[in-house]
Image (cartoon, helix red, strand yellow):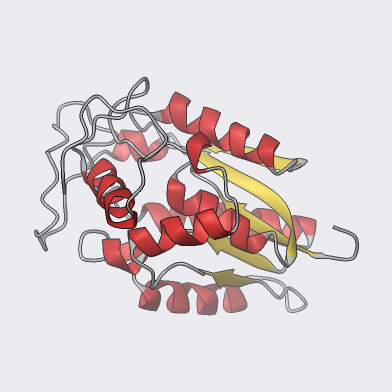
Amino acid sequence: MENKKIAVVAVSGGLDSCVTTAIARLDYELAFAHINYGQRTQDRELKAFNDIADFYNVQHRIIIDFNHLAKIGGSSLTDYSMNIVEADLEADEIPNSYVPFRNANILTACVSWAEVIGAEAIFIGAVFEDSSGYPDCRPDFFDAFNKVINFGTKPETKIEIKTPIIHLNKNEIIKKGMELKAPLNLTWSCYQSEDKACGVCDSCALRLRGFQQVGIADPIPYNVRPKY
C-alpha cells in the first residue's frame, strides 16, 4: 500500500461495489464510504459493507446517514406504502425501486470526503445494464458529474469518478470478481430481505441470472432461486 494514491470507494455491500473494490485496490489505497438512506435492508447492507472492509483490511471508513432520501420517498426501497414488484428483466421502464437521484447524493458525499483526505479518485459500481431502469447509472451522468467536481472543488483538487464495470453485464462482473478473488460470499444485493435474499426483486434477479450464466451457484442464501 505504500506510496499508493488514495481512492474513495462507494461500497453499498452489494456484488457490484465489491467487485469495483477489488479493481480499485490494484492501484489505490482504499477509503470506504457507505450511505444509509433508510432502505429496507439498511442493516444487512451495513453488515456487508463492514465485512468487505474487514476482508480488505480497510482502515479508512465513513458511514453517512442520508435519511432525507427516506423522507422524500418516491421509491419502494424507502417507502413502505409501495410494494417492491417482482423482476421483469425485459421491461424498459423505470422500476419503482429507483431512488430519485440517489447516485448524485452518494457522489456528493464521496467528493466532500475525498477532498478532505486527499483522494484522487472515487470508484462507484454503476452498471450500464441497469441504466434502462436507473437513469443515474448512465455513463453520461458520470461524465457530467466529473465536470461538476472540476467546477465545484478547490483549484488544486483533482478528483475523478471511475466506473470500471459500467459496460460489463452481470455475468462478466461475476467473472471479474472471481478472477480477482473478491469475497462475493460477503455481499448482499436483495432489496427487501435481510435474512435470506428474496430471489425475485430486480436486484436478486439480475444477480441470479448472472451466476446462472456463469454456471456456478450464488454463494448467498435465498428464499427461492428462480431460473432467469
Report x, y in % for residue 31.
Answer: 70, 50
Q: Name the residue at the front extreme.
A: 215
Quarter of the picture holding the N terminus? bottom right
Q: Count the marks: how many?
A: 0
The image quarter containing residue 41 is top left
Q: Is residue 213 left or right of residue 139?
A: left
Q: Name the residue at the top extreme.
A: 195
| Vertical arrangement, residue 3 with respect to residue 191, above or below | below
| Vertical arrangement, residue 186 with respect to residue 215, above or below | above
The one nearer the camera, 118 or 15, is 15
Report x, y in % for residue 205.
Answer: 22, 45
Q: Is residue 156 left or right of residue 174?
A: right
Q: Is residue 171 left or right of residue 176?
A: left
Q: Is residue 34 left or right of residue 14?
A: right
Residue at image point 75% right, 40% down: 57
Residue at image point 46% right, 24% down: 43
The one nearer the camera, 175 or 66, is 175
The image quarter containing residue 47 is top right
Report x, y in % for residue 133.
Answer: 21, 59
Report x, y in % for residue 94.
Answer: 16, 57
The one nearer the camera, 4 or 111, is 4
Residue at image point 72% right, 54% down: 30
The one nearer the camera, 223 or 32, is 223
